Image (cartoon, helix red, strand yellow):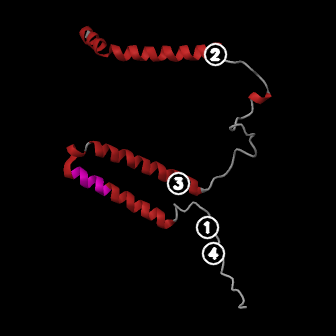
Amino acid sequence: MEQDATALVAEHWAIGLFLLAVVTLCALMMGLSSLLGGRSRGPSKTLPFESGVTGVGSARHRFSVKFYLVAMLFVIFDIEAVFLFAWAVSVREVGWAGFWAAALFIVVLLAGLLYDSRVGVLDWAPKGRGRPAPTRRPDA
């Protein structure tokens, strides 16, 4: 039992040292920032900073549902890129079975993108009134 504990410590001493260094560094940085940091107080310190512009209106602004749909589509296709990158790295090991699995993955995502396009999820610009009807000039 004692020999197992010694072997465990011998194998994992570097992780313990790393964790101790991280905790020490964090405590040192927080301590130094509290000692050396500015202590100015005033009414302007309590106001929210909006890139130098004074905030106007309520922070409870409603967003369109299309904003969230576009955000979800971004996340979905970003994750797709991660999966395809992992596939590209291991393409030689996975062989033809991996190729067809990745092809099926891409086809399913393209079908989803086509569906989203037909439903109108990607149309986030406001619809215009269309082209104005051409005016006829009286013949002179």
Work out whether mark 1 precedes mark 2 in sequence or the reverse, and give the earlier one: 2
Q: Residue at x 35, y 46 (%)?
A: 83
Residue, far front: 140
Q: Amino acid at mark 3?
A: Val
Above or below — where is 76 with respect to 46?
below
Of tags 4 and 2, which is closer to the observer?
Answer: 4
Work out whether mark 4 precedes mark 2 in sequence or the reverse, and give the earlier one: 2
Of tags 3 and 1, which is closer to the observer?
Answer: 1
Residue beneath disc 4: 131
- The percent position of residue 41, horizontal first and vertical second, equals 76, 22
Residue beneath disc 2: 34
Q: Residue at x 63, y 53 (%)?
A: 63
Q: Amino acid at mark 4?
A: Arg
Mark 4 → mark 2, Cα distance in angstroms: 63 Å
- The percent position of residue 2, horizontal first and vertical second, equals 26, 8
Q: Are marks 3 and 2 in contact (CB under 8 Å)?
A: no
* Dominant secondary structure, magenta: helix
Residue beneath disc 3: 70
Location of residue 126 by image quarter: bottom right
Work out whether mark 3 precedes mark 2 in sequence or the reverse, and give the earlier one: 2
Q: Are marks 1 and 2 in contact (CB under 8 Å)?
A: no
Which contiguous range is marked in magenta?
97-104
Above or below — where is 113 with respect to 78?
below
Mark 3 → mark 1, Cα distance in angstroms: 17 Å
Mark 3 → mark 4, Cα distance in angstroms: 27 Å
Q: Residue at x 25, y 11 (%)?
A: 1
Residue 127 disc label: 1
